[in-house]
């Protein structure tokens, strides 16, 4: 375990780090997740092993601190992640990010362009959220914060299922709710527009069974590499470890 102070009050982001060759590779999880639990097997795969790898938990999640006074917006997540990477001397880095973490990574590259060398998005949300009553993240955002802290938390855990719930229990409840609300109420330019504006190598992985990727033609025309991964759902790195590892390795090849 490694750690970096990211706020003057001592608030700390932590990560699991594997030693290896530079440039460093930074892995970022999604809402209610934890990077080591989701990425460890894939990072140990022969296609990805041998590089310095930081499996980072965003503030409020996993093994990182969970202050109740943080905003937990995607912008704040990006800025605090930037501070952690600078303090870890892990820049510029290749960043691999899943789901909500993809939005954080896009904003990291946009707000701190000197810190990100290559970007790989893993089934990340590029457009506005549409309401889905079966979605745990939508359910989270549907509660007021007081309701979520009092009772909504238990309902969301039941909906999440055992795998997601296992890491969601590690998350701060303020972090879960405020992050979900920020995604729902997002007024920034579309993530796909920001992604298209970046001037670094960019790859988007998505579950082939859910394809084609919306807006794929526009993204490809803008220089974004689109890669469907077979035999998987949303959690590509868990469902198809080999396919994920090989796709990421190809995206980060020099």
Image (tube, rainbow, N blue to C red):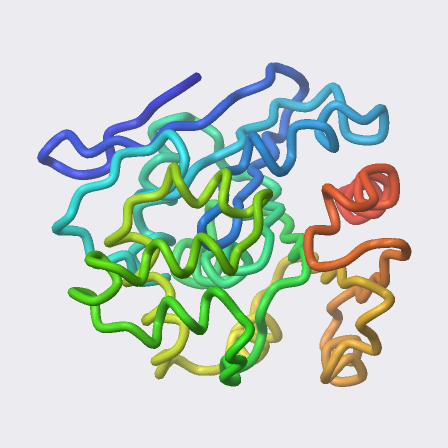
Q: Quadrant of residue 89?
A: top left
Q: Position of residue 63 (x, y in %)?
A: 37, 29
Question: Left or right: 118 with respect to 14?
Answer: right
User: Which residue is painted at 76% across and 63% down in the image?
Assistant: 206
Say if 132 sits above or below 76 in the image.
below
User: Which residue is painted at 48% across and 55% down in the image?
Assistant: 158
Image quarter (top left, top right, bottom left or bottom right) of the N terminus = top left
User: Which residue is painted at 57% across and 67% down in the image?
Assistant: 198
Q: Position of residue 186 (x, y in %)?
A: 37, 78
- Residue 232 visible in the current orientation: yes
Q: Quadrant of residue 93?
A: top right
Question: Left or right: 112 with respect to 211?
Answer: left
Image quarter (top left, top right, bottom left or bottom right) of the C terminus = top right
Front-most of residues 184 and 203: 184
User: Which residue is painted at 39% across and 60% down in the image?
Assistant: 155
Question: Left or right: 50 with respect to 132?
Answer: right
- Residue 254 visible in the current orientation: no
């Amino acid at each position: 375990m490694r750690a970096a102070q990211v706020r003057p009050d001592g608030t700390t982001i932590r990560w699991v780090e594997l030693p290896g060759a530079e440039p460093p590779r930074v892995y970022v999880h999604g809402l209610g997740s934890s990077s080591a639990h989701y990425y460890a097997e894939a990072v140990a795969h022969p296609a990805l092993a041998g590089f310095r790898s930081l499996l980072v938990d965003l503030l409020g999640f996993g093994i990182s601190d969970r202050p109740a006074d943080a905003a937990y917006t995607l912008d704040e997540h990006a800025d605090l992640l930037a501070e952690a990477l600078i303090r870890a001397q892990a820049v510029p880095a290749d960043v691999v990010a899943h789901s909500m973490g993809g939005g954080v990574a896009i904003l990291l590259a946009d707000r701190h362009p000197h810190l990100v060398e290559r970007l790989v998005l893993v089934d990340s949300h590029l457009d506005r959220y549409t309401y889905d009553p079966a979605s745990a993240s939508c359910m989270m955002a549907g509660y007021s914060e007081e309701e979520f802290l009092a009772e909504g938390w238990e309902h969301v855990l039941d909906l999440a299922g055992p795998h997601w719930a296992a890491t969601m229990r590690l998350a701060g409840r303020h972090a879960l709710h405020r992050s979900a609300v920020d995604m729902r109420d997002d007024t920034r330019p579309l993530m796909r527009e920001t992604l298209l504006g970046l001037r670094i190598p960019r790859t988007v992985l998505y579950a082939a069974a859910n394809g084609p990727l919306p807006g794929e033609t526009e993204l490809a025309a803008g220089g974004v590499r689109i890669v469907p991964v077979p035999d998987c759902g949303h959690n590509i790195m868990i469902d198809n470890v080999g396919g994920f590892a090989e796709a990421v390795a190809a995206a980060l090849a020099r």
